[in-house]
Amino acid sequence: MSELINSIEQGLKSRVIVCLDVAHGRVVKGINFKGLKDMGDPVELAVRYQEQGADEIVFLDIKATLEQRANALEVVTRVAENLSIPFTVGGGLNTYADVAQFLNAGADKVALNSAAVKHPDLIDQIAKGFGSQCVVVAVDLNQGQSQKQDQNKPLSDYQVFINGGNTPTDLDAMQWLAQVEQRGAGEVLLTAMHRDGTGLGFDNELMSKVSEQLGIQVIASGGACKPEHFTETFLAGSDAALAAGIFHRGEFTVGQVKDELLRNGVAVRNEYLKD
Amino acid sequence: MSDSVMKEASKTVGVINTGAGNLYSLNGCLRRMGFYPVTINQPSDLERYDISALVIPGQGRFRTVMTNLKACALDEVITNWYRDNKKMVGICIGLQIMFEESEEDPGVSGLGLLQGKVTRLQSPKQPMVGWSDVQSSEDWLNNQTLYFVNSYGVSASDKSIATVTYGQTFVAAIASNNTIAFQCHPEKSGVAGEEVLKQCLS
């Protein structure tokens, strides 16, 4: 409970972030890795979640291949013109020029994942060029895969993955997170791969440890399937929590998650309650 | 000009081009509120439109924005607009440049319309990113939940009309002459932000 009181005293609301996967200018959902189901127009869906009370939207896998680039940029501009809350784009952004294109098209922030691991300087460059507030570094961690467990090292049983969770790296998870901060990232989006799709809730032991260690905000991701999971992760010290399926499947609205948070004394933006 | 056209023209808002970021969000927000944003790139642009208010957008760092404004003589446009008591809104860096200087870029002079200095904030996590309630003696602003993105701010000002607390308390909004400026981003603050901006621009 002390963490909760602490976060309220600090004065920032706990943020609920909705993640949308975009391909070919449409929001999509993968079906058993075989095909993509069309879920609708990115602007319409983002606005719908904004009205439900989302504090922020993240567009991932925006398929920023060269052929798709113009299309993706047009979507970003339309979102910027129509959304009245912040939004982040990520997936497939590999160079400073890529990032500049998306920020100039209207994105508030970009999320870097594999590119940050392969070219850590990219974090410094974007922070210098556009400001730390534009840089979210996404870190995908998997637990229990590491061969180099060490009791004295925090997170030694977690391994950093890149390339959409397909490629393990040799990075020390906590050292990488500290480096991300030191290079100028404004926030870290921390996905617990071992929780993704399980519905077991966020890996709050992980979120708690990282949030305590870092001087930048931690966005928890992976595993949420009910409103209580959001309460738990905010109590554990997460600054924001991101989810996709729980909202896209229509199981809960963002408002229902926030109702639960308010009942538990977690400070959230409650504009969705007003008509 | 018919009456209806006159009325439309008075809804034209000039957005100062600070050369430090895109204007899609701000322009989209102004259009949703029923205003017609036009971009002001140089002093002569003021004569091309019947502008009811100026807005200084909220992206970019202190040095970049001041350098770009000076290069286009837009610093004088802002200063004259302020001194003439015309309606103006500043957002984030648009508030900060109204002060004398900033720790973000030591040695760079601000517009100096307001006394004081922009300092690095003592916040629990930096940058401050997220939503916070502002405290104000003004009813339209008090307890509004608005979106903040900043590492720097003004800790106190005699022109302050609202404060916010994240680790330390600092200025969330100022009012002086006919200018209102925000440390937060009303254009990114949902319905609350649009209501706040409408109050300033109407």
Image (cartoon, rainbow, N blue to C red):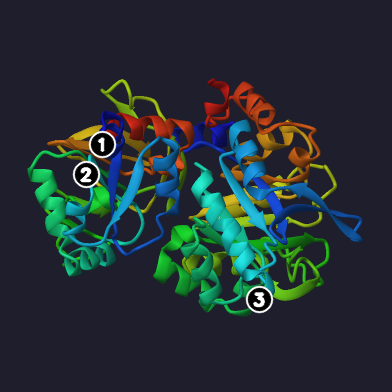
Amino acid type, residue under disc 3 in the picture: Leu
- Percent coordinates x, y for residue B134 in the rendering: 36, 31
Q: Secondary structure at mark 1?
A: loop
| Vertical side of A121 occupied by A221: above or below | above
Q: Residue at x 41, y 70 (%)?
A: A129
Q: CA distance from mark 2 to mark 3?
A: 42 Å
- Percent coordinates x, y for residue A75 in the rendering: 60, 57
Q: Are marks 2 and 1 in contact (CB under 8 Å)?
A: yes
Please tell me the numbered disc located at residue B10.
1
Query: Where is mark 2, residue-wise?
Result: B50
Crowd tier of the residue under label 1, counting other residues whose Cα lies within 10 Å: few below 14, some 14–19, many 20 or above:
some
Crowd tier of the residue under label 2, counting other residues whose Cα lies within 10 Å: few below 14, some 14–19, many 20 or above:
some
Q: Are marks 2 and 3 in contact (CB under 8 Å)?
A: no
Q: Quarter holding the N terminus of chain B?
A: top left
Front in this rendered view, residue A194 or B194? B194
From the image, state whether disc 2 or disc 3 is nearer to you: 2
Q: Residue at x 63, y 70 (%)?
A: A69
Count the labels in the image.
3
- Percent coordinates x, y for residue A77 in the rendering: 53, 56
| Vertical side of A174 occupied by B196: above or below | above
Crowd tier of the residue under label 3, counting other residues whose Cα lies within 10 Å: few below 14, some 14–19, many 20 or above:
few
- Percent coordinates x, y for residue B82 in the rendering: 13, 45
> Which picture quadrant has residue B201?
top left
Please determine if labels 2 and 1 lie on a single subunit.
yes
Is B14 on the left-hand or right-hand side of A73? Answer: left
Q: Pointer 2 indicates a residue of which chain?
A: B
Q: CA distance from mark 3 to mark 1?
A: 43 Å
Amino acid type, residue under disc 1 in the picture: Ser
Q: Residue at x 15, y 39 (%)?
A: B86
Please tell me the numbered disc located at residue A66.
3
Q: Residue at x 47, y 70 (%)?
A: A126
